[in-house]
């Protein structure tokens, strides 16, 4: 373990120290990346954001999921209530 990492871990969890080390390594990687590599990353980000794979993170998808879950829950409650009424009515008719 390096001295700088050892110093950083005093009084902190090892997870926090690993996160800080990872952040430092990421900063170093980004700072030393070539301009061409930077442009490649930008193109990949643009392709992702404009592609179909971003949809699950969109407001439209989130809204649809909430509405779908509310409607499904409501239908289940109504359906269950209808079944309970039908069973009760059948019971009344039979007895």
Image (cartoon, rainbow, N blue to C red):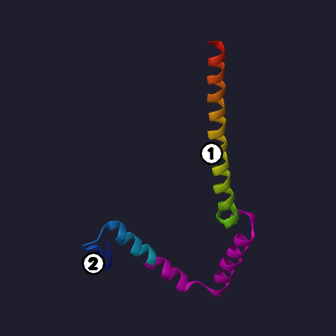
Quadrant assignment for the N terminus: bottom left
Q: Residues within 10 Å of mark 1 (few under 14, many from 20)?
A: few
Residue sitting at 67 percent across and 66 percent down? 59
Residue drawn at x 54%, y 85% is: 32
Q: Which residue is mark 2?
A: 7
Residue toward you, 10 or 64: 64
Mark 2 residue element: helix
Q: Is residue 71 above or below residue 80?
A: below
Quadrant where the image shows the C terminus? top right
Residues shaded magenta: 24-53
Image x and y of residue 10, in percent: 25, 74
Seen from the viewer's position, the closer of residues 56 and 1 is: 56
Where residue 27 sits: x, y (%)?
49, 81
**Quarter residue 30 falls in:** bottom right
- Mark 1 sits on what residue? 73
**Principal secondary structure, stretch drawn in magenta:** helix
Task: Report the Cα–Cα distance between label 1 and label 2.
Answer: 54 Å
Residue at the outermost top position: 95
- Residue placed at 67% from the left, 84% from the top? 36
Q: Mark 1, mark 2: which one is toward the viewer?
A: 1
| Marker disc for residue 26 | none
Which residue reaches farthest left? 11
Magenta span includes 29: yes
Q: Nearer the viewer, residue 27 or 93?
A: 93
The image shows residue 42 at horizontal and vertical percentages of 67, 79
């Amino acid at each position: 373990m390096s001295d700088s990492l050892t110093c950083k871990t005093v009084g902190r969890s090892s997870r926090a120290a690993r996160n800080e080390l990872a952040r430092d390594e990421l900063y170093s990687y980004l700072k030393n990346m070539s301009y061409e590599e930077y442009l490649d990353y930008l193109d990949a980000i643009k392709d992702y954001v404009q592609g179909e794979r971003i949809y699950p993170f969109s407001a439209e998808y989130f809204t649809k999921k909430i509405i779908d879950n509310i409607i499904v829950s409501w239908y289940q409650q109504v359906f269950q209530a209808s079944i309970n009424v039908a069973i009760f009515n059948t019971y009344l008719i039979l007895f």
